[in-house]
Image (tube, rainbow, N blue to C red):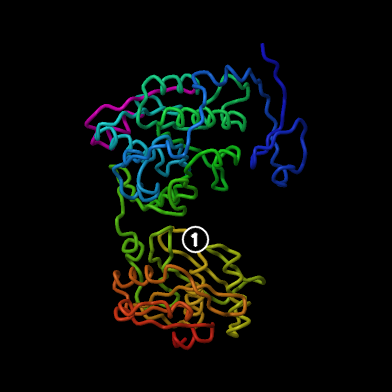
Amino acid sequence: MAKGKTVYFCKECGYETSKWMGQCPGCRQWNTLVEERVTRTSDKKSMRGISPSKVTGIFQVSMEKEDRISSGMPELDRVLGGGIVKGSLTLVGGDPGIGKSTLLLQICRNLGNAGRTVLYVSGEESLKQIKMRADRLGGFQKEIFLLCETDIQAAADMIREKKPDMVVVDSVQTMYSDEITSAAGSVSQVREVTSVLMQVAKKEGIAVFLVGHVTKEGVVAGPKTLEHMVDTVLYFEGERNALYRVLRGVKNRFGSTNEIGVFEMREQGLMEVSNPSQIMLDGRPVNEAGSVVVCSMEGSRPLLIEVQALISPTSFNIPRRTTVGIDFNRLNLLLAVLEKKAGMQLGGCDAYVNVAGGIKLAEPAMDLGIVCAVISSYRNLPVHPGTIIFGEVGLTGEIRGVGHVEQRLREAVKMGFSRAILPSTNMDGLGAGIRDQIELFGVSGIREVLQTLNL
């Protein structure tokens, strides 16, 4: 019988040590080491069913169009970089009840109806529960295979036997390997389960989707090495009770990162939103102070979003700062720039900034839109409703250039906007075609912004 031992794993980077330490030597994070009791067997047993590797020349590797499979959902294909790649390992994370299992079951339905072989492995739900969800979604015309199993070796053997085109494992935290004695969901178990599935995916050429639970901080539970091991990491964003969901690709070895797909949750499951800009601007107030429309580049997609700001005199000793959808520290930085360079006395005011629609914005090009919304609310003067705003704001009050300017402007024209305020450095490279379709105002500093907006 193999001898067990107690080791400590870092939850962030997977560093292993025989004793507990306050700071991880690998990633320098504090209080991230957790105790695990593990039992390791011989390497031969852990590699059972895996054929010996061989050396292959790069010119001998064949690339075919069939290496990508359409999921039947264009929004998901966009996030994945053009479709599901054979032999890929994809991790899908999100809050409980946000729609991870629903989305993957819809993909299984689409592939099954297209004549593909699909295996759905569930460690959380019974066969009847999966059947109930399938009946609610509807549209199943051909058979898909279900397996309720938590032993990863048994599941891997079944995958090798059936050789499906796609496998869904729901979820990685419920699977366990009998070669390790720690409980399912522990650092060592999650790492071992992912390693087995990665070997199966690469050797057999099967697309594998993993469902991952998230912590209260919004990251996938388990070691950080889990995200490094997989090929693609997708996160579901949005409130569980909200109408719209955003699927964001934060890692993708087969396409661009930070692509998003927008879905609407209905009784029949997740429905695609083909024009997210129109959805995000529905219900936007007209001629109201503090409301500004910005254009964010989410991967290769321009997205028009409303940014709202509310500035009011504070009744507290320390003014309140609240943000929804943008970084809290970024708002403090922009408020400091306005106080220093525009002479606005914001130190005695509460500041609330909200991104409508539940979208999270991290692009620096949103700075100018946030600044304009704050100024509009502070002066209680509305911004022209047909104006689109984007640009990065520096600490000295300068407006820096951003990328993908023509794409942003074309999206604004498509949505009916007639004016655009943008960095003056971006004006030079614009063609005559886009200049004829929308009125452009180039600005280089905060004071020019105030003059342009007549605020």
Give the residue at x 55% y 45%: 219
- Does the image show residue 310? no
The amino acid sitting under disc 1 is: Gly
In the rendered picture of this protein, how many numbered marks are placed on residues? 1
- Return the residue nearer the eye: 415 or 287: 415
Give the residue at x 70% y 16%: 3
Give residue 217's position: percent from left, percent from top: 57, 48
The answer to whether residue 142 is magenta is yes
Q: Secondary structure at mark 1?
A: loop
Q: Image quadrant for the N terminus?
A: top right
Q: Work out whether 132 lies above or below 21.
A: above
State the extent of the magenta-drawn residues as a range.
Answer: 130-150
- Does the image show residue 23? yes
How busy is the neighbourhood of tag 1: few (under 14 within 10 Å), some, or many (20 plus)?
Answer: some
Which residue ends up furthest to the top in the rendered image?
Answer: 1
- What residue is shown with label 1? 325
Give residue 150's position: percent from left, percent from top: 48, 23
